[in-house]
């Protein structure tokens, strides 16, 4: 390699020198714009910064015009302390506490290298939460793969799960829930979305801003190495003619032990008030952290790249800037606090180096080997990237897809067929027991986990004295998204909202991870725009603001994009977690009540997929007023102690919900259903839940439901060791369909699938 | 005066706060000890908690065994100080040769977090005196390297001298030899346990309160001294 850097002086003197901007993912228009902003061609290091900061991943250039809807139509919420644009949104949950939570995708790395891709996905989202000033308290994972029996799924799924297990368990964060789904559309495009939630006192909120001229910029955590450099290796080869760079991994390698030390170290730094601004290093590493901190504070910054601790001394300035080495943070610290800051880091064995300082120049300037290699206005990279209004076109096949109604599909009739349908749904990979996966995650560490999978939502206690806690659920349904992205996004939101409420929590705020195909495909952009519109409208109707989120585009192999899959996370608050409501039936002789209205809605249903491999028609109708009323009933009933169990109805309808209620503690139930038994059992109408009412509270509960206008019908009673279903038809001629399934048989069907696929 | 029980935090310890909570729930005062401490501050009992000390690099517990605090703890334990090692703490006690045997990868080669039943077979230790002989308790097992192994001679000696403190009941979750979930040293003051009693002290956050007995036992043992 050559030691000669492409300096600012040289860039000014050699305007015509060709640069590999296209290989770095910049268009010629974008490259020209950089030249206009700087009044000269960029140096290689500057080109590195702009290429990563203006990438889709960092700049949201294709999604920005749509995401504005979240802020524009946000319902008024006094709870929001920090919103979109920060590392993560922050929500007031009372008693002086605030929580911050966010979900982020690590889809592409997890396909290339499942173990490290998924592991570093957890690491990245945890640092986002840490950078807000919060202690991370739990994680969740929303996972989607190709067909469960596809050979590649057997490579990707076990790797992803063990990567999450390895990293999260070693960090000491309980994993309290999430999703696991399979669909052919995710073959070659698995979705690995990781969520983290953290807690802080109001006054501890930290923002990513470099303020105060003369304040020091400190890089701390792991050394910077040549891992995770995507585009930079292009630069390196183009500039230095090196050949070794091709062997470098483009997926980062995680060290959860270092991350655990970083967490404890940061919390001690916050407690001692030694930090004025902080940013985690994720995508685009030092380039992103320096530009965002400088832009966030409206200040300038001088950085000396020679003092950045390296794992590989051969790294040049562009590579140092773009490296995505994990477990690193950057802080802005007053000069008088630097000594104390370094002492805390030393106590935790965390390497910390002063690499620069805040200036009043308004410029981000960096030197390498004594020469100026970067001199840019930081906001031009961080905030003023290109914004695209991509072409939007409703796909030509959308009408035909919606016209392909599942009403034409053959349906099971009579007790034995309905019984077989229930068992086959229960054993299908997407609905089967997930213990094979979730047992690999530590859900008990820190001793505050009140509910975890397979409950409707994860519930974490925050204050041991008062019982204050939070509930979190993530949901998404790609089939509904495909049939109608507007409704699909609202159904994902409604399901997560309902799940949180089913535990007794009051839903408060929303995060999202929007997984889509290529934004350059007008059909995908239509799906995206519809989904964002649906989610924004849904949040407004439910009165819960979007606090932040993440967009993952380009989830497609060749021409086929994934189903539009917005994954929505809803956070709720429990004033007292001791009133939480689990899904499991725990006592005998308890009345079972169905809440909500059931219509024959099978478009995109689990039954259509499992029984017929069919996905067509319309998704279930969205009724957000009904969702809101249902949630009010569930949360109020929990607070008043009226319920013994509650379970939301979603995939597989009432049949799956009842089976899961029975399986939890091994207690059966007998129910009698009116009307068409197939519809009653397997329809996926939204805004429904099944509850077990505490004996003696039946009248109070019925009155509560009536007050909120939520239909409540008593189905039967708990007890016995079977799930017994009886039809109640008005027409005697059709006969009385009925069946019963011993809980042991339900268990065998439910629990055998994943071990047999992945052991 | 409230009895004081130390809980050691190594870099990478994770269940230290949980162990401290269990100590407090039992009525004692938890005292944090740092891995770099060279003084046990006159504590009457010490817990080595679960987690991944020093990232479990090299081998679980292999680096922690050389921490400064262990330089104090090892002779104190040999002199009779009650010490309980839970999960990673058990691994550290084996690496420090305070307990016989070793912990290896689970039979299924995967980390498991599961509620298990465990039978208390020795109630003669300061950590188990509050249990009934052969009492079955429900506790959380969460580990990737929880399979207990020892050579045949050691196993024979453990069995004949009653040093097996606890065995898994109703199924062996991780391939531990003889279903062994916990053992003690010759004198009985040092106990290692793979499952986590500190995660079974409250029905709200764990499988009941069966684990509390380990912490109330040591409190009583300290009072009797």
Image (cartoon, coloured by chain):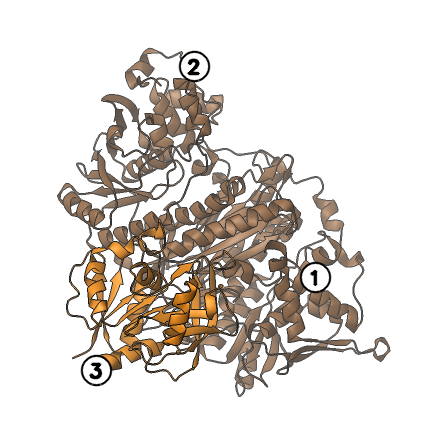
Chain colours: A brown, B orange
Q: Nearer the viewer, mark 3 or mark 2?
A: 3
Q: Residue at x 45, y 22 (%)?
A: A21
Relative to A303, say whether A141 is above or below: below
Badge 3: chain ID: B
Q: In the visual, does A43 lie left or right of B76?
A: right
Percent across and percent down for residue B115 are 47, 70
Q: CA distance from mark 1 to mark 2?
A: 59 Å
- The numbered dot on residue A106 is none
Q: Secondary structure at mark 2?
A: loop
Q: Would you say the residues marked 1 and 2 are in contact, meaning their CB atoms lie under 8 Å apart?
A: no
- The numbered dot on residue B223 is 3
Percent across and percent down for residue A259 are 34, 49
Q: Secondary structure at mark 3?
A: helix
Q: Residues within 10 Å of mark 3 (few under 14, many from 20)?
A: few
Q: Residues within 10 Å of mark 2 (few under 14, many from 20)?
A: few
Relative to A90, say whether A21 is above or below: above
Taking depth in this image into account, of A583 and A636 the one nearest to the observer is: A583
Relative to A375, say whether A90 is above or below: below
Q: Which residue is mark 1?
A: A601
Badge 2: chain ID: A
Taking depth in this image into account, of B41 and A542 the one nearest to the observer is: B41
Q: Residues within 10 Å of mark 1 (few under 14, many from 20)?
A: many
User: Which quadrant would the N terminus of chain A be assigned to in this image?
Assistant: top left
Q: Tell me, yes or no, if residue B182 can be seen here.
A: yes
Upstream in the sequence, badge 1 or badge 2? Answer: 2
Badge 1: chain ID: A
Q: In the visual, does B54 lie left or right of B224?
A: right
Q: Which residue is mark 2?
A: A18
User: Which quadrant would the C terminus of chain A be assigned to in this image?
Assistant: bottom right
Q: Nearer the viewer, mark 1 or mark 3?
A: 3
Q: CA distance from mark 1 to mark 3?
A: 67 Å
Q: In the visual, does A615 lie left or right of A31?
A: right
């Amino acid at each position: 390699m050559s030691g000669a850097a492409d300096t600012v002086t040289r860039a000014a003197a050699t305007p015509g020198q060709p640069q590999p901007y296209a290989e770095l993912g910049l268009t010629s228009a974008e490259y020209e714009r950089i030249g206009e902003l700087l009044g000269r061609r960029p140096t290689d290091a500057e080109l590195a910064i702009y290429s990563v900061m203006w990438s889709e991943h960092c700049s949201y250039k294709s999604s920005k015009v749509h995401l504005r809807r979240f802020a524009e139509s946000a319902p008024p919420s006094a709870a929001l302390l920090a919103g979109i644009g920060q590392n993560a949104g922050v929500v007031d949950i009372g008693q002086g506490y605030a929580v911050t939570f966010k979900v982020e995708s690590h889809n592409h790395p997890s396909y290339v290298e499942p173990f490290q891709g998924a592991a570093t996905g957890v690491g990245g989202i945890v640092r986002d939460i840490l950078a807000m000033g919060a202690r991370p308290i739990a994680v969740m994972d929303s996972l989607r793969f190709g067909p469960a029996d596809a050979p590649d799924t057997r490579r990707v799924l076990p790797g992803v799960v063990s990567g999450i297990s390895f990293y999260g368990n070693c960090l000491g964060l309980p994993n309290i829930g999430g999703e696991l789904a399979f669909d052919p559309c995710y073959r070659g495009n698995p979705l690995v979305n990781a969520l983290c939630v953290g807690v802080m006192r109001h006054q501890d909120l930290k923002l990513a801003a470099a303020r105060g001229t003369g304040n020091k910029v400190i890089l701390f955590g792991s050394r910077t190495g040549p891992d995770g450099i995507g585009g930079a290796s292009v630069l390196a080869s183009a500039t230095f003619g090196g050949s070794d760079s091709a062997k470098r991994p483009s997926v980062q390698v995680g060290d959860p032990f270092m991350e655990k030390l970083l967490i404890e170290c940061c919390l001690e730094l916050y407690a001692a008030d030694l930090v004025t601004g902080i940013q985690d290093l994720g995508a685009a590493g030092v380039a992103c952290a320096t530009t965002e901190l400088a832009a966030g504070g409206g200040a300038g910054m001088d950085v000396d790249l020679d003092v950045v601790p390296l794992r590989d001394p051969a790294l040049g300035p562009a590579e140092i800037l773009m490296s995505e080495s994990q477990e690193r943070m950057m802080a802005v610290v007053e000069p008088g606090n630097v000594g104390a800051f370094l002492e805390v880091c030393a106590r935790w064995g965390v390497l910390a180096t002063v690499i620069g300082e805040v200036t009043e120049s308004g410029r981000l300037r960096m030197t390498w080997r004594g020469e100026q290699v970067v001199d840019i206005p930081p906001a031009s990279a961080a905030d003023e990237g290109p914004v695209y209004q991509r072409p939007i076109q409703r796909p030509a096949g959308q009408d035909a897809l919606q016209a392909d109604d599942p009403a034409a599909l053959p349906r099971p009739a009579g007790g034995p067929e309905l019984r077989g349908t229930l068992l086959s749904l229960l054993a299908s990979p997407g609905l089967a027991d997930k213990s094979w996966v979730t047992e690999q995650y530590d859900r008990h560490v820190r001793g505050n986990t009140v509910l975890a999978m397979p409950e409707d939502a994860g519930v974490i206690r925050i204050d041991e004295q008062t019982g204050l806690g939070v509930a979190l659920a993530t949901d998404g349904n790609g089939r509904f998204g495909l049939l109608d992205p507007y409704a699909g996004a609202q159904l994902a939101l409604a399901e997560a909202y309902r799940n949180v409420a089913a535990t007794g929590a009051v839903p408060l705020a929303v995060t999202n991870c929007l997984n889509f195909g290529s934004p350059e495909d007008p059909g995908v952009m239509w799906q995206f725009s519809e989904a964002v519109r649906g989610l924004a409208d849904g949040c407004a109707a439910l009165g819960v603001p979007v606090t932040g989120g993440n967009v993952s585009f380009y989830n497609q192999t060749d021409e086929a994009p994934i189903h539009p899959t917005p994954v929505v996370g809803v956070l709720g608050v429990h004033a007292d977690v001791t009133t939480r409501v689990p899904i499991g039936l725990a006592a005998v002789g308890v009345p079972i009540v169905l809440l909500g209205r059931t219509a024959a809605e099978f478009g995109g249903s689990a039954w259509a997929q499992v029984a017929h491999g069919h996905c067509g028609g319309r998704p279930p109708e969205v009724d957000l007023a009904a969702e809101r009323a249902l949630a009010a009933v569930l949360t109020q009933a929990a607070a008043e102690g009226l319920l013994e169990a509650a379970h939301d109805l979603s995939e597989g309808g009432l049949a799956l919900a009842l089976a899961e209620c029975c399986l939890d503690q091994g207690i059966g139930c007998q129910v009698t259903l009116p009307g068409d038994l197939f519809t009653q059992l397997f329809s996926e109408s939204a805004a429904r839940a099944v509850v077990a009412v505490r004996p003696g509270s039946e009248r109070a509960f019925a009155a509560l439901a009536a007050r909120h206008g939520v239909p409540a019908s008593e189905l039967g009673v708990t007890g016995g060791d079977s799930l017994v279903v009886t039809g109640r038809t008005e027409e005697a001629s059709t006969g009385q369909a009925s069946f019963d399934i011993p809980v042991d048989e339900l268990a065998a069907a439910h629990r055998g699938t994943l071990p047999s696929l992945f052991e | 005066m409230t009895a004081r029980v130390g809980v050691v935090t190594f870099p990478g310890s994770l269940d230290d706060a949980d162990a401290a909570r269990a100590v407090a729930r039992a009525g004692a005062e938890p005292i944090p000890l740092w891995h770099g401490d060279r003084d046990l501050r006159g504590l009457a009992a010490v817990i080595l908690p679960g987690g991944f000390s020093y990232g479990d690099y090299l081998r679980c517990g292999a680096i922690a065994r050389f921490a400064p605090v262990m330089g104090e703890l090892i002779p104190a334990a040999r002199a009779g100080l009650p010490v309980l090692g839970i999960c990673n703490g058990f691994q550290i006690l084996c690496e420090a040769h305070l307990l016989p045997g070793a912990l290896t990868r689970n039979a299924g080669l995967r980390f498991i977090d599961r509620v298990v039943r465990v039978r208390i077979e020795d109630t003669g230790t300061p950590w188990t005196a509050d249990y009934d002989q052969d009492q079955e308790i429900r506790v959380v097992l969460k580990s990737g390297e929880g399979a207990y192994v020892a050579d045949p001679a050691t196993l024979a000696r453990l069995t004949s001298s009653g040093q097996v403190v606890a065995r898994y009941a109703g199924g062996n979750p991780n391939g531990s030899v003889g279903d062994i979930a916990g053992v003690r040293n010759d004198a009985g003051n040092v106990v290692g346990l793979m499952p986590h009693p500190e995660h079974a002290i409250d029905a709200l956050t764990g499988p009941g309160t069966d684990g509390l007995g380990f912490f109330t036992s040591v409190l009583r043992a300290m009072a009797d001294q």
